[in-house]
Amino acid sequence: MAELRDIEQIINAAVDRALIAFLRYSPGIRRGQQYRDIWVTTSPTPCRFCIAIASLSEIVNVQPGGPFPVPIWVDVPYNSAIDITYAAEAHAHPNCQCQRETVFILR
């Protein structure tokens, strides 16, 4: 019988796999690009979904106004899958208090 993992292990594994896939297929920093967007959680208790997006946005290059990569994971004893979808706006769900912030790229 398969051992069940706790939610933090599932999320960390999903974020790692999503990051690898996103970096493999996404463009890097373009020549002359000076800014990028990050996902900022403003809630004192952000959901795990938004924490995952915020951690990915610190690592990957999200063009200003571009979509944020969102890891989607399924982890049950009989099936394990990972996918990436995109969130165009920082308000990803009805109670979301996150914001899109444009930051200068330090080189």
Image (cartoon, rainbow, N blue to C red):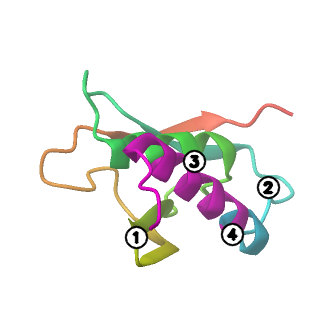
Q: Residues within 10 Å of mark 2 (few under 14, many from 20)?
A: some
> Where is residue 27, by image quadrant?
bottom right
Contact (CB < 8 A) between labels 1 and 2? no
**Residue corresponding to mark 3:** 56
Magenta-span inclusion, residue 16? yes
**Residue corresponding to mark 4:** 21
Residue 77's disc number: 1
Q: Earlier in the sequence, mark 1 or mark 3?
A: 3
SS label for mark 4: helix
Contact (CB < 8 A) between labels 2 and 4? no
> What's the magenta region?
1-21
Q: Residue at image x 48%, y 41%? A: 54
- Amino acid type, callout 2: Ile
Q: Residue at image x 38%, y 46%? A: 7
Magenta-drawn stretch, dominant element (helix, strand or loop): helix
SS label for mark 2: loop
- Amino acid type, callout 1: Pro
From the viewer's perspective, is the residue at label 3 or at label 2 nearer?
Answer: 3
Q: Report the front residue among 46 and 33.
A: 46
Tell me the CA gap for discs 3 and 2: 15 Å
Q: Earlier in the sequence, mark 2 or mark 4?
A: 4
- What is the residue that sits farthest to the left in this orientation? 94
Q: Residue at image x 87%, y 34%? A: 107
Q: Is residue 79 left or right of residue 22?
A: left
Could you tell me residue 75's position as x and y percent?
Answer: 42, 66
Query: Vertical placement of 101 versus 63: above or below?
Result: above
Query: Vertical placement of 20 versus 85: above or below?
Result: above
Query: Vertical placement of 30 versus 41: above or below?
Result: below
Could you tell me residue 99's position as x and y percent?
Answer: 35, 40
Q: Earlier in the sequence, mark 1 or mark 2?
A: 2
Tell me the CA gap for discs 1 and 2: 39 Å
Q: Earlier in the sequence, mark 1 or mark 4?
A: 4
